[in-house]
């Protein structure tokens, strides 16, 4: 099954969850080494500036798929 | 009840409040540890650069839901 | 009276002023302490990088309300 | 005469010039002190990162007014 | 054959792959020296802040071509 | 002949090239001194964070003109 079968979702919450999934997928594709991603995790999740940017990415992806 | 029952709101102010809610939700989902979020709070709310970026996130989310 | 009665404005300039208002409101809501905001003011208004980002926020909000 | 009489322009180049005007106006409104703006000018125009962000602001404003 | 024959794709996943391709192409065009790009690779793929921005670029390009 | 005769292009690749042209034009207009721009070139083209932002600018401009 494809990881992104559709941009359509049943509910706004599912659309939001899809926006988060889209945001993370490119990180995996750009840095396929899981150990390298784990090393970045503290910086990723404990830095206010980065979390704000993550929120911006999700907001932008939500434009792609938030119409539900 | 779902946390995001709808993207439609009755008034522009409610749409703006929803844009703020959307902006914060991803932070909670990315950093579920409330204590860790509290530790970031001073940086989050007392740094001009971060507040400007928060404003950008809300503006982008408002594109998602601001049409009311 | 609500602070955001409508996203519709009579003229492009009023739409632009509304975009600025939207950009600032989230800062107030995220940092409600006026003294704290005042302490950030020099950084906010005297740093070229921040002013450029403020301009980006207003441009994005103008997408929300600039159609007049 | 208002500084922003219309978002409609005759040609794409005029639309682009208007996008630049919009980008600069908010800087003036946020930092009305011309001397303070002049002090930031070297940082503004000689820093690659800032110029790239200025380009992003103009691109975003061009979405507001680029349709001519 | 052109590197960008079309913005239309058969599936959402192909649209997403195209968004990634678009995001990378400008880097190649701005820095054509492959050795220089290779030197930046560690910073590019091992810095959380940069990966978050890469995700933002792809989200924005997905707006260009994600409708599939 | 105007530097921006039209936002319409024949092919997606031409639209992408135009998006790059738009992204660079504002840099020229903000920093008209060619020598100053040349001094920034190494930072501009050899810094991963800046190249990622350049890609974001082009993606945004592509929204302006990518429909071909």
Image (cartoon, coloured by chain):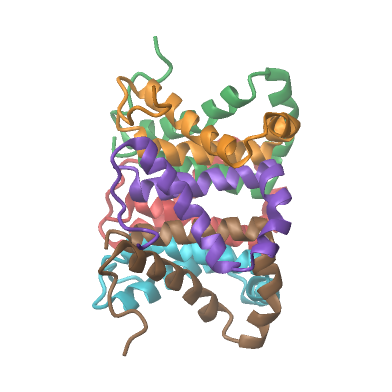
Chain colours: A cyan, B brown, C purple, D orange, E red, F green
Choose top left, top right, bottom left or bottom right for residue C36. Answer: bottom right
Choose top left, top right, bottom left or bottom right for residue A40. Answer: bottom right
Left/right placement of residue A65 relative to residue D34 reads left
- Provide residue E2's location: percent of width, then percent of height: 37, 36
State whether residue E35 appears in this view: no
Give the residue furthest to the bottom.
B1
Left/right placement of residue F19 relative to residue B11 reads right
Left/right placement of residue B7 relative to residue A62 reads left
Nearer-the-camera pick, D3 or A66:
D3
Q: How many numbered markers are drawn? A: 0
- Provide residue A41's location: percent of width, then percent of height: 66, 76
Classify the position of the N terminus of chain B by image quarter. Answer: bottom left
- Provide residue A3's location: percent of width, then percent of height: 37, 73
Nearer-the-camera pick, C8 or A38:
C8
- The residue depicted at 36 percent of the width and 52 percent of the height is E63
Left/right placement of residue D32 relative to residue C19 reads right
Choose top left, top right, bottom left or bottom right for residue E33. Answer: top right
Classify the position of the C terminus of chain B by image quarter. Answer: bottom left
- Provide residue C60's location: percent of width, then percent of height: 44, 48
Give the residue furthest to the front.
C1
State whether residue B25 appears in this view: yes
Nearer-the-camera pick, F55 or D21:
D21
Q: Is residue F62 above or below residue D7?
A: below
- The residue depicted at 47 percent of the width and 66 percent of the height is A23
Nearer-the-camera pick, A54 or C41:
C41
């Amino acid at each position: 099954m494809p990881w992104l079968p559709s941009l359509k979702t049943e509910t706004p919450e599912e659309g939001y969850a899809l926006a988060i999934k889209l945001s993370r997928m490119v990180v995996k594709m750009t840095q396929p080494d899981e150990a390298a991603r784990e090393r970045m995790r503290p910086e990723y999740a404990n830095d206010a500036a980065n979390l704000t940017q993550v929120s911006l990415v999700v907001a932008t992806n939500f434009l792609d798929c938030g119409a539900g």
